[in-house]
Amino acid sequence: MTAASPIRIWDIPGGIHPQENKLQSLGHGIETPPLPRELIVPLQQHIGARAEPCVAVGDKVLKGQPIAEASGFVSCPLHAPTSGTVTAIGPAPYPHASGLEEWAIRIEADGEDRWCELDPISDFRALEPAALLDIIRAAGISGLGGAGFPTAVKLKARPEQKIHTLIINGTECEPYITADDSAMRYRAEQIVSGIEVLMHILRPEQVLIGIEDNKPEAIEAMRAAVGERPMQVVVFPTKYPSGGEKQLIQILTGKEVPSGGLPADLGMVCQNVGTLLAIHDAVVLGQPLIKRITTLTGDALSHPTNVEALIGTPIRDLLTFAGLQPEKLYRLVMGGPMMGFTLQSMDAPIVKTTNCLLAGSKAELPPPPPAQPCIRCGLCAEACPASLLPQQLHFFALGKDYDQLKRQNLFDCIECGACSYVCPSSIPLVQYYRAAKSEIRALDLQQHKADHSRQRFEHRQERLQREAEQKERDRIARAEKAARLKAAKEAEAAKQAEAGTAAPAADAPAPKAGGLTPEQKQLKIAAATAQMALKKAQKQLTANPDNADLQAQIPQLEQAARDAQDAFDEAQGEVSSQPAAPAPQAAGEDDAKKLKIEAAMLRAALKKAERAAGDSPSDEQQAEIAKLREQAEAAEARVPATAAANKPVDEKLKQAKLDLAMARAATRKTERALAESPEDADLQAQLAARQQALSAAEKALHEAENSSPIPPPERQRVDKKPVDEQLRELKTNLATTKADFKRAERELKDATESGADTAAAEQELATRRAALDIAAKAFADYMASKETN
C-alpha cells in the first residue's frame, strides 16, 4: 500500500442537478421497526440464477439459518430473517415494475427472534483470501447499492486482472435517498472494518472512498473512522449521476471504463458502503445478510426516516411504521425518482436491493405530461454522462433497428434518466432504451440457442463421419488380411502341386471327409453373397413396391443366385461322387469351373474399375478398363458351352411371383395407413381395390404354377411352435417403456444443457423409470414361471 497522496478530482461529461430532498429523512437516525408477523423471502434477489429452497413447508427455522442454496456460480444463498415456521413455498408478491409474482419462501415469525449458531471470526487476517471469499459467498451477500451482483463473484478477479485500486462508493447521488448517508454517519467503524476485510482479500495499492460534498456529517464520520489507516476519503462536487460505477471511477482516477468492459479490466473494484457493512457483519460477527438500511420518505409519510429492516418485511408494514397517510399517497416508488420504478402492490416485501421507498403525493410526483415530437434541441446529448446520442438511440429504438442500437453503444446507457429529465418534449427516453435492451437480450438468447443446436448437429455429423471412416478402414483392413491369407494359401497349394508332380500320386493327401476344397469354399461364399443381395433387393421392393429399378433388378439377382448355387452344388456333387483315383474327364470339368470363376472375377474387376473411373476417366483408367474388358471377353470365350448353360427359367411364373409380392406389399402398406386413420374413406376404398388385386395375383400365380413345364420344388412341412401371445405382449410393452425412458433421458439432458427449468423433465423421467421397472419385472416373472413349468 502506497502512502496517501492528494487525489486530483476529474469531471464527467453531462450530468444534471435535480432537487435533492434529502433532509426530510435524516432527522431520526437509523430506527428499528417492529418484527413483522410474516416475512416473504423471494428466491430471486440478485443477478444470476434463482436460489433453490433447502427447507420444506412446516419446517422450523432459526434466525440466520440457510433456507435456500445458490444454484450456480452467479447466484446467492438466502437465510431466514427471523425464527419461525415455513408456511409456504410458491408464488408471492414481488417488488417489480411488472407487478408479476415470484417464487418465495413465507415464514411465520414466532416472536422469539432466536439466532442459529454463529461462527464469528476473531482475526480475519489469519485467514487466506479464498476462505474469506467463501464466507462472503455463504453469507449471501450481493451488491446493496446497484443491480445486486453477487459480491464474491465480483471480488474473484481473474489472474490476469491484478486489482490495484479499491473504490468505495459513498456518493448516493439520487434525490430523496439517504440510506448510505445514514450508514456512514452511524456505522462508520463497521464500514471501515469491512474495507479492511476487502483490503486483505484484494491487496490493493490504494483505497479511495468517494463522497459528494452535500454529506458533511458522513464525511467527518468516515474521516474519523479511517484515522491513520491507508485509505483516503475523497470529497467532490455534487452532481447527478456521479454515483454510477463508471462515472465514479472517472471522477476519482480520470480513467474511463471501455465500452462493454468492466472496472476489473482497469485493475479496479468498486463497492457500495452498504455492501461493506454486510461484509463486516458476515466476517466479524458471523451474521448472514438478512437486513439492510432502507430510506422511508415522501410527502405521504408523517414520519420519514431510515430503518434497519429485515429482508422480506412487507412494504405495508414499513410504511405503516413511517406514518403512511393513504389519502395523500399518489405513487409508491422503490428507489429514487430518477431510476426507481412504481410498485403495483404494498404487499410485496423489501429485498436486498431495496434502498428506498418513496411514498409521494400527486404534487410531489405529478404524472408526466404527454410526450411531444422531438425538436432536436440536443439537451439530452449534453446531459448524458456516458457521452451517448440519446436522440439517435430513440429513433433506432422506435424503428427496432437493433444493429444500429448496438453500434451506438446502447448497453453503455446506465439508465440514469438525465436525458428524460431535461427533455422539453417530455419523451420517456429511458423506457424506450429499457424495452430495446430487453428485446435485444431476447434475440441474442434465441440466437445462442440456435447456434448451440447447430453446433450439436455439426458435432453429431462429424462423429458419424468419423465412425463411417473407421468402419471403412476396418473393412479395408479385413479385405487386405483376407487377400494376404488367400495369397498364402495359393502359394502353399502351388508348392504342394509342384511336389505332387515330382512324387507318386498315391502320396497326395486325400481331402478330409466332409471338408471343402478352396474352390468349393470360394463357390460357397459366392452363392451366399448372391443370395444376400437378392434378399436385400426383395426387402427394398417390399418397402417400395412402385420402384421400377428394383423390379428390373430382381430377375437378374435371382438368375445370379441360381447360377452361383448351381456351381456350388455341382462342385459338391463332384467331390462326393469322385473316386479315389480321379478319372481323366474330371480334370476337364474342373478346368471348366476354374475358367468360369476366372471369367466372373474378371467381370467383377472390370465393373469395379468402371465405378472408380466415374463419368470422366483418365487416360490410364481408360487403358486399364480396355485391358480388363479384353481379358474378360477372352475368359468368357474360353468357358465351354456346357459350362455356361443355365437351367431353364419360366418367365411367366417368375412374373407372377413378382406381381404377387408387389400386390401383397401394397396391401400391407394400405392396411397400416388405415390403422392410423380408420375413418378415411379414400383409404378404405383403396384397401378394397388392393385386396382384389392381391386375390387376382394369387390366382394368376396358381395358374402359372399349374401350366409351368418346370416341376415344383420339393417342400417339407415343418410344424411351427405356437405363438405365445402373452410373451409377445410383454416383450412389446418392455420395448415401448424402454423407448419412453430413453426419450425422457434425452429431454432432461436437453433441458439441463439449455438452462431451462428441469422440474417437469425430471418428473417425466421418474414416471418413465417406474413404468420401465414394472414392465421389466412382469417380463422376468413370466419367464421364470415358464422355466418352472
Image (cartoon, helix red, strand yellow):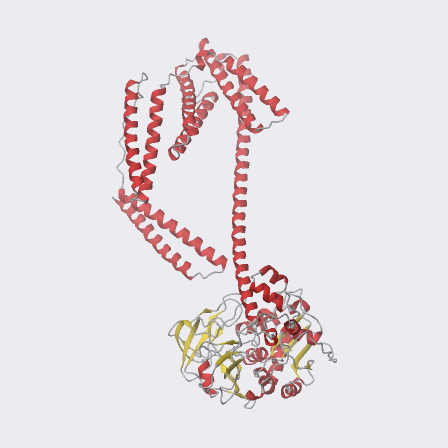
Viewport quadrant of the N terminus: bottom right
Q: Is residue 18 left or right of residue 83?
A: right
Residue under the point 65% across and 68% down: 388
Q: Is residue 471 above or below residue 581?
A: below
Whole-percent x, y for residue 267 in the image:
68, 69
Q: Quadrant of residue 682?
A: top left
Instruction: Return the residue found at the far bottom.
Output: 27
Whole-percent x, y for residue 637 in the image:
51, 13
Viewport quadrant of the C terminus: top left
Q: Is residue 621 left or right of residue 738?
A: right
Residue under the point 52% across and 47% down: 460
How many numbered marks have been drawn onto this rendered protein structure?
0
Q: Is residue 416 left or right of residue 3?
A: left
Instruction: Return the residue found at the far top.
Output: 584
* Residue 708 vs residue 771, the one in the foreground: 708
Q: Is residue 646 visible?
A: yes
Q: Quadrant of residue 169?
A: bottom right
Q: Is residue 201 visible?
A: no
Residue under the point 54% across and 33% down: 476
Whole-percent x, y for residue 141 in the image:
54, 74
Q: Is residue 106 above or below residue 560?
A: below
Whole-percent x, y for residue 241 in the image:
63, 77
